[in-house]
Image: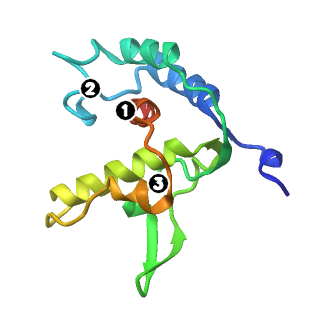
Amino acid sequence: MEIRDCPVDQGPDALLEEAAKRVAAGAVDPDNVDPRTFGPGGFRDPTDLLDWLIRNRPPLVEPVLVHGDLCLTNLLFQNGSLSGFLDLPGAGVGDKWQDLAIVQRSLQDHMDGHHGHPHPGCRPDRLLDLLGITPDPQRHRWYLLLDEIF
């Protein structure tokens, strides 16, 4: 089986379609997002954010298998090595930046102590270096903002 044979589309168009349904249903909780997303200096409301996401949708250049919510709490480790994944309903063919943006935010949150003790030596920006991936700030931001709707 090849990646193109995967029946689950998690590319930008499919994600925007689901995001539009959530916004229309009033299912976005503005109190459960980064405080900078809505309000002064941010978006007026979820509809304003969705409009921006639609206007700035990145193309799906390099389809890969994505987890869909790749954060540290969805990774299993054993003896210091990755041994498995949890919470896979968002898995499918999509853009690697979806997972990269979410996992980097998760690393940053853990570093800052949002989930217990701070880890000041952790540098989320090193992840891309270790993977040999050139940063793409626009895609990174787009996927973080998209995640605010979910």
For mark 3, what is the residue?
A: 70
In the image, what residue type sits under mark 1? Glu
Q: Residues within 10 Å of mark 2 (few under 14, many from 20)?
A: some
Indicate which disc, 1 or 3, sits on the residue closer to the N terminus. 3
In what element is the residue under mark 1? helix
The reply to whether the C-beta atoms of the residues labelled 2 and 1 are less than 8 Å apart is yes
Q: Is residue 75 left or right of residue 29?
A: right
Front-most of 122 and 82? 122
Q: Quadrant of the C terminus?
A: top left
| x and y, in percent, of residue 31 in the image | 23, 31
Q: Residue at x 35, y 58 (%)?
A: 126
Looking at the image, can residue 80 be seen? yes
Mark identifier at residue 37: 2
Q: Residues within 10 Å of mark 3 (few under 14, many from 20)?
A: many
Q: Quadrant of residue 40?
A: top left
Spatial separation of the CA atoms under disc 3 and disc 2? 21 Å
For mark 1, what is the residue?
A: 148
Indicate which disc, 2 or 1, sits on the residue closer to the N terminus. 2
Residue 31 sits above or below residue 92 on the image: above
Indicate which disc, 3 or 2, sits on the residue closer to the N terminus. 2
| x and y, in percent, of residue 104 in the image | 36, 51
In what element is the residue under mark 2? loop
In the image, what residue type sits under mark 3? Leu
Front-most of 115 and 134? 134
In what element is the residue under mark 3? loop
Q: Quadrant of residue 72?
A: bottom left
